[in-house]
Image (tube, grey):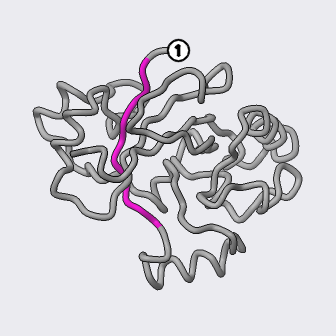
Amino acid sequence: MGMPYFIAVEKFSPHSGQAWQEYIAWSGLNHLREVVSLDILLCAPVVDELTAEDWNYNVQENYLTDYFHDLDYLLRRVDTFDHINILAVLLNPESDARYLWADERFEFLGYDLIERTTGVSALTNCGGFDQAFANDDLSPVGLLTAYDDACKVQNLLKMHYPDDPHADCDLWAIWRMNRGSAT
C-alpha cells in the first residue's frame, strides 16, 4: 500500500449552527459530535478551484483532483482557511489501514463508505440502510472504526440494496491531522 492522499475539508459539527441541527434531526444520528467524512456535501473540499501550481501536486486520476500527494503543499495552500480538517486517506485498503500508514501528526479515525459516482457517504448522508448497519454502529464522528465491520457493511449494502446507487461505495480509511500539528 502506498502513501495516502491528503485533502482539506470543511468541518461539520455543532459549530455549523442551523445546518447541523437540521442534519441531526433528519439523520437521527444524535450521538455524533462531528462528521469527519469525504462526503462532498457535508464536508466539502476546501480547495474548490485548482490553480496551475496545484496540478503539480494533486491526484490526477479517477476524478480525485481535490486530493493531493504532497501534504506540505496542501498545508501551504489552505493555511488561511479556518474550520477545516486535514485528512490523510487510503482508498480501498486490502487490510486494516491503521497498520498500513502512520504519522505522529495524524490520528486514525476509521472508515467511510463513499458512493463512487456522487461522493456522498452511505454512512452519514443517505438516510440509513437498516439491513447493512445501525446508526449506533457509527463512531461519534460518523465512521466505522473496525476494518472488518466496514468491509461487512460495504458487502451488505451491495447485497441488500443492489439497485440503490448510494450502495455502490468505495471504502476509505481516514486519519485526521491533530490540531496544532500543521504549524
Residue farthest along the top direction in this orientation: 1
Where in the figure is residue 141, as x and y percent of width and height?
59, 58
The answer to if 67 sits in the magenta stretch is no
Front-lying residue, 165 or 91: 91
The residue at the point 61 percent across, 44 percent down is 112
Q: Which element carries disc 1, helix, strand or loop? A: loop
Quarter that holds the C terminus: top left
Residue 17 in the figure: left or right of residue 53: right
Where in the figure is residue 170, as x and y percent of width and height?
61, 35
Q: Is residue 55 above or below residue 95?
A: below
Residue 109 in the figure: left or right of residue 87: right
The residue at the point 52 percent across, 14 percent down is 1
Residue 42 in the figure: left or right of residue 67: right
Magenta part, dominant SS: strand
Picture quarter containing residue 67? top left
Where in the figure is residue 63, as x and y percent of width and height?
40, 33
Q: Amino acid at mark 1?
A: Met
Q: Is residue 42 above or below residue 157?
A: below
The residue at the point 65 percent across, 81 percent down is 25
Where in the figure is residue 24, as x and y percent of width and height?
62, 76
Residue highlighted by disc 1:
1
State which region is magenta: 3-12
Picture quarter containing residue 76? top left
The residue at the point 48 percent across, 26 percent down is 102
The answer to if 8 sits in the magenta stretch is yes
